Image: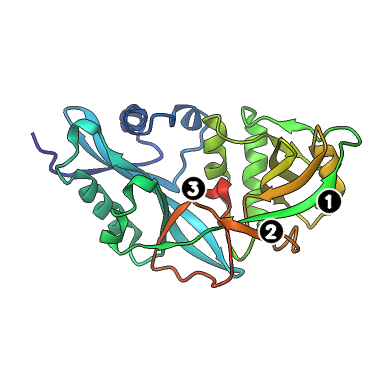
Amino acid sequence: MEPVAVTEIGQFDTGLQDLFCDYVPQVFRRADFRRWRAWGEWDDAYRAFSLLEAGRVVANTSVMRMRLLLEGREVTAYQLGAVGCLPSHRGRGLARVVMNAALDACGDAPVLLFANPTVRQFYPRFGFQSWKQMLFAATYDAVPEGPPAPTLSLEDAEVRAGLAALSSEGLPSTERFGARGYGTVASWPVANGFARPLRQLGPDAWVFAGVEGDTLYLDDVFAREPFDLRAWLPRLIDRPIRTIRFGFTPERYWPGAVEAGEDTEADLFVRGLRLSPEAHRFPIMAHT
């Protein structure tokens, strides 16, 4: 039987959330929402627009409400995620149905998404245009020194609350094209084991960072006040480094960083959104 209506799954729809959580790993093999949901991170900012058939979700587009920053100006926007259809149900136009339902829910607000490279031709049909994201890097020699910065665990509810507070109330890692209040977005890759460790640089400055080879990957910074990032680097590394790679536009924390090529793993699509002509990278911890 063909599904006849799109079902919206929200914060308190626990039974429908179970069906959504069953759907996700069937379409995205490495993704799961169960742990994130158990942490209480599914709040009123996240809604799933699903087609149900025979008691299961067969297609979905989710909408995350975002507080975007564009050159320092905050705007309400939406980011799409978990867009797909069960392999057994493809070719019937079901993804188009849920996309339209999700976009209707967004109204006239700007919308963005990060797409799988295999579906680049899909989103322009809905008024999206692709937008280049750049990589940023800096040459910097440092060696470990002093006690290592503590590692924080988002298994701890107090840590999750702290991340949410720093994200909402503190300084954004970038104002060129960034966001505020995305603690529940940043916690999702952690819940799935995709994120680098969360390290504490004092009580009100936390970073997602890790060393690979001789490179420090600094994925995001959550801080209440400005601080000297360079002074903390020896405590973030366990071996000598020569390079830093940034997961965001580092105009605040490392203005001397240089463009290091295009981010070919981030297929950004935007609708109703005018972005800076300057090179930028939307924080990777803010991707849904």
Q: In this view, does 34 lie to the left or right of 219?
A: left
> Dot 3: few (<14), some (14–19), or many (≥20) neighbours within 10 Å?
few
Q: In this view, does 14 lie above or below 118?
A: above
Q: In this view, does 195 lie to the left or right of 11?
A: right
Q: Do the residues labelled 1 and 3 touch (CB within 8 Å)?
A: no
Write down the residue under mark 3: 265
Q: Is residue 136 above or below residue 218?
A: below
Residue 262 at x, y percent in the picture: 54, 57
- Element under disc 2: loop
**Amino acid at the residue labelled 1:** Arg
- Element under disc 1: helix
The N terminus - image quarter: top left
Q: Is residue 151 above or below residue 245?
A: above
**Amino acid at the residue labelled 2:** Pro
The label shown at residue 230 is 1
**Amino acid at the residue labelled 3:** Glu
Distance from label 1 to label 3 (Cα)? 28 Å
Asked whether 76 or 261 is in front, the reply is 261
Q: Is residue 8 left or right of residue 254?
A: left
Distance from label 1 to label 2 (Cα)? 13 Å
Distance from label 3 to label 2 (Cα)? 19 Å
The label shown at residue 52 is none
- Element under disc 3: loop
Residue at the location (57% across, 46% down)?
Answer: 285
Write down the residue under mark 2: 250
